[in-house]
Image (cartoon, rainbow, N blue to C red):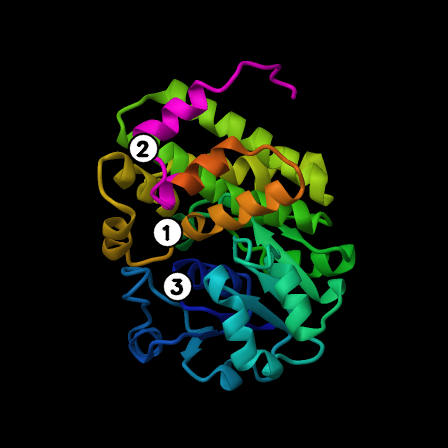
Amino acid sequence: MAKVAVMGAGSWGTAFALVLADAGNEVCIWGRLSEVCDAINDDRENTEYLPGIVMPSAISATTDPMEALADREVVVLAVPSQQLRENLHAWGQHIPADAVMVSLMKGIELGTHKRMTEVIAELTGAGPERIAVVSGPNLAREIANREPAASVVACEDQAVAERLQKICHSPAFRPYTNTDVIGCELGGTTKNIIGLAVGVCVGLGFGDNTKASVITRGLAETARLGAAIGADPVTFSGLAGMGDLVATCSSPLSRNRTFGEKLGKGMSVEEVTGATRQVAEGVKSCQSVSELAQKNGVDMPIAAAVTALIEGRLTPEDLVVNLISRSAKSEMV
């Protein structure tokens, strides 16, 4: 049994807390909202983000980050990616010096173009042996329902990855290890952007051929960027690449696909944002990923088109036309 803090009481943080508890660990969730933490402690339910799911007694919750982090061996970071720096400035100094930090976040920081593990390393001074990533086809509601799922635990230190693998291996959740942190993070980030594009196509009424084309070409441009920044190409054919991409682009439970679908049906970015309770990470990360691609001389037309759509420079119809009307070339380029 490990003592684990989950910093973030949203749907994915809460679902992963359930995985950890089912695996036999003691889990304390930190959340910003007292009503969410009170509901977890008193009613055994996160009524705001995962209503109807009973929380086991091994899970507690608090609004006090110092309480959540005290004496924890593992610290799981599950805040929105663009708020990580702000949160670590607020309570990062309270993370135990020997704790392993696990990122559940899927984004590239605006402005710095840093992956979440790079932000963690910068602000905590931790070495790569203390920083890991969990990524894969893990829709929060299905995980919370204990539907069978697999994921990847990535850390540059294989022994640490194996330790974390044991800590989160529950009856319904099967984690695999990997040492390619860059590839796992990048796959988790770009799939949200591709999910937005697929959602737009669905909202416009296009069928499976269009969706499959966008998914496949989206994976190709992800792999191109991955190769440029040091990822292992094999990662993108696995759970943290293709697996996560398929789940995000195929399921109505995906925030990013749903966001894109509403755009395709004619809603504005502001209207969809106002009607959406949870963060669709691709809406922010599309800009930073596009800039990272440009910085590395990588062509990512889908990411660029989604960025233009979010910024109001393209309509949903234009997005699809622009992608299809691009000059023909070899599939392998």
Q: How far separated are the C-alphas under marks 3 and 2?
A: 29 Å
| Circles 3 and 2: CB atoms closer than 8 Å | no
Say whether disc 3 or disc 1 marks the residue closer to the N-terminus: 3
Measuring 67% from the left and 52% from the top, which residue is drawn there?
A: 154
Determine if the magenta segment contains residue 312. yes
- Residue 186 placed where, x, y %? 60, 46
If you read the primary sequence from the N terminus, does the residue marked by circle 3 or circle 2 appear first? 3
Q: Find the magenta span and give its range.
A: 309-333
Q: Is residue 269 above or below residue 91?
A: above
User: Relative to 203, is 123 above or below?
Assistant: below
Numbered disc in front, either 1 or 2:
2
Question: Is residue 46 something that shows in the picture?
Answer: yes
Helix, strand or loop status at disc 1: helix
Amino acid carrying label 1: it is Arg
Q: Is residue 224 above or below residue 183?
A: above
Q: Which amino acid type corresponds to the residue marked 2 in the rendered image?
A: Pro
Q: Residue at x 52, y 26 (%)?
A: 216
Depth check, mark 3 against mark 2: the one in front is 2
**Is 244 positioned to the left or the right of 120 in the image?**
left
The answer to which quarter of the image holds residue 294 is top right
Q: Which residue is mark 3?
A: 10
Read off the residue under disc 2: 316
Q: Amino acid at mark 3?
A: Gly
Q: Is residue 107 left or right of residue 314?
A: right
Image x and y of residue 308, in percent: 41, 40
User: What numbered label is drawn on residue 141?
Assistant: 1
Residue found 66% across the figure and 37% down from its top: 297
- Where disc 2 sits, the SS reads helix
Counting other residues with Cα less than 10 Å from the Cα at mark 1, is it few (<14), some (14-19), or many (20 or more)? some
